[in-house]
Image (tube, helix red, strand yellow):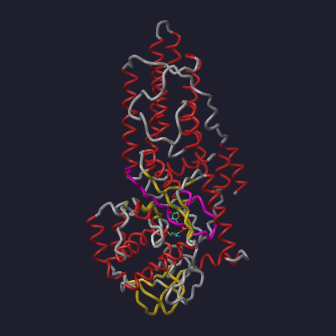
Amino acid sequence: MKEKFYITTPIYYPSNKFTLGNCYTTVICDTIAKFNKKLGKDVFFLTGTDEHGQKISLSAQKAGKTEKEYLDEMIADAKKLWQMLDINYSKFIRTTDDYHEKAVQKIFNALYEKGYIYKGKYNGLYCTPCESFWTESQLVNGKCPDCGREVKVQEEEAYFFKLSQFSDKLLDLYKNNPEFLLPNSRVNEMVNNFIKPGLQDLCVSRTSVKWGVPVEFDPKHTIYVWIDALTNYITALGYGSDDPSLFEKFWPADVHIIGKEIVRFHAIIWPAMLMALDLPLPKRIFGHGWMLFGGDKLSKSKETGVKECVDPRILIPRYSADAIRYILLREIPFGSDGNYSTETFLTKFNADLCNNFGNLVSRTFSMLKKYFDGIIPSVEKYRENEINLQNKVLKEKDNVLEYMKNFDVSKAITSIFNIFSEANTYIQLAQPWAVAKQEGQEEQLKAILRTLLETIRIGVELLEPFMSESTGKVLSAFNLKTNSTFENIDNFDGLKANEKIGELSILFPRLDIAKELEELALLS
Ligand code: ME8
């Protein structure tokens, strides 16, 4: 039986159109999902939208629409964006889906029956855009610590989840499973900022919020949007429905990938709920850093005043899904914050995609055509120079596999591009054009070109989950299948000798950066 792999993105709020920030997490998850498929695993990749709560109602009202009308339009736009960005999810869950709402009610009932939920009175400081209650000590300058907006005092009859009972269990969890929450620094944040000061019971229903899932046995209460949202990871698999077969197969998740600002919900509330339900916990939670735009997170709750064009709906058709995926995957060290700027993007496009990768492929293909009529040569024996390059390629390949085990997409893609740089350096060293001019050096020329072709093949196989459009073109020119499991990535014998390679169009056309900057400024 195939090993299974279950990966999730956060379910995003469709209170505004999705940003490059949302694209960031989704591209990472899509890449990890595709990579694991190529490793031969049975993969389930979940994404979706978090559609309840006051914030959504307010956005719909502002647009002069009903919630349903508003949401349907936003979700159509979101799905189109994922298609443009070459995202291949297994399932898109909407928390307004009927099966999800029913399962959330069942889960709430079960927690109540087990005595983990009780009725009380809530008096707290609430931030509407973030759907979060805060304690006085958590506020920053009297304002919401997440978005910096005003909070207001709110009192109401409410149901509570006995989160306070889980402090020791959570501390044990982090201690016994050092891989549960990554990167490791996030564990200290949870322990020092939330658990050590004392976990309070969590208010899990609102009577003031109407747009949400009603508590089944007390319908004037609406289930707190985070309880509703977190359960998506199991309801999407059919937990609480008539057909839990996917749940039985794929749960627990191998990894929930999320932004660092929502780690506390995933690493405290979610495991506590699962423990209360007697369900297994996700194997890992990865809280990645933020992509910053002029130093700002481009949070949808806030106006940013960013002047650059950062709309993926403009950038993707203009520069290709691959180019946008590249910059998202490469530029931000995984786990840390990183800056996005249009200028860096355009510079990297030319340097890495056009010069390093694109040029290597087109140079190699044209030399093969010129010297061997496009026929892949067979080689008897490689010399030291070729073997040196081959060893470097295999070492980088090992690095890629290792980094991907830890979901470090940024280091992995850097290693893949090192393969291309090494090949370009080797061309300078091997000087095939000079070898071609020498009498009796045909075998040597064959060895050089075959090594280059096989290097490109291995690089492109590894790169396919990251950028499938350009790599697909190269694989097809090699007469190799796209989206197949990794084969022959540990040898230089993956191409059929004496076969002719196919035609290949330019992968990444060189950009005039000044002109692009000017035109993009007009579009921002
Ligand atoms: O928090 N850099 O939804 P949300 C990196 N509905 N990642 C970013 C980003 C940026 N600048 N901007 C957004 C919610 N993200 C809840 C989640 S899950 C059960 C419920 C990504 O629409 C990142 O993954 O505010 C972040 O955690 C998420 O979008 C927030 O999306």
Q: Residue at x 32, y 60 (%)?
A: 179
- Compared across the picture, whether 60 is left or right of 268 comes to right
| Along the line of sight, the residue nearer the viewer: 469 or 251 | 251
- How far across and how far down the image is residue 421, in percent? 47, 34
- 4 in the magenta segment: yes
Q: Residue at x 45, y 81 (%)?
A: 108
Quarter residue 160 falls in: bottom left
- 54 to 380, vertically: above or below: below
- How far across and how far down the image is residue 304, in percent? 61, 66
- How far across and how far down the image is residue 510, in percent? 64, 37
- How far across and how far down the image is residue 39, in percent? 41, 45
- 227 to 258, vertically: above or below: below
Task: Please give the count of numbered marks on the rendered protein.
Answer: 0
**Magenta stretch, residue numbers:** 1-24
- Compared across the picture, whether 317 is left or right of 294 comes to right
Q: Is residue 195 visible?
A: yes
Q: Is residue 285 visible?
A: no
* Quarter containing the C terminus: bottom right
| Along the line of sight, the residue nearer the viewer: 45 or 384 | 45
- 372 to 41, vertically: above or below: above
- Compared across the picture, whether 407 is left or right of 102 comes to left
Quarter residue 379 falls in: top left
- 21 in the magenta segment: yes
Q: Residue at x 59, y 46 (%)?
A: 323
Q: Which residue is the extreme one toward the front?
A: 242
Q: Residue at x 62, y 71 (%)?
A: 15
Quarter residue 220 falls in: bottom right
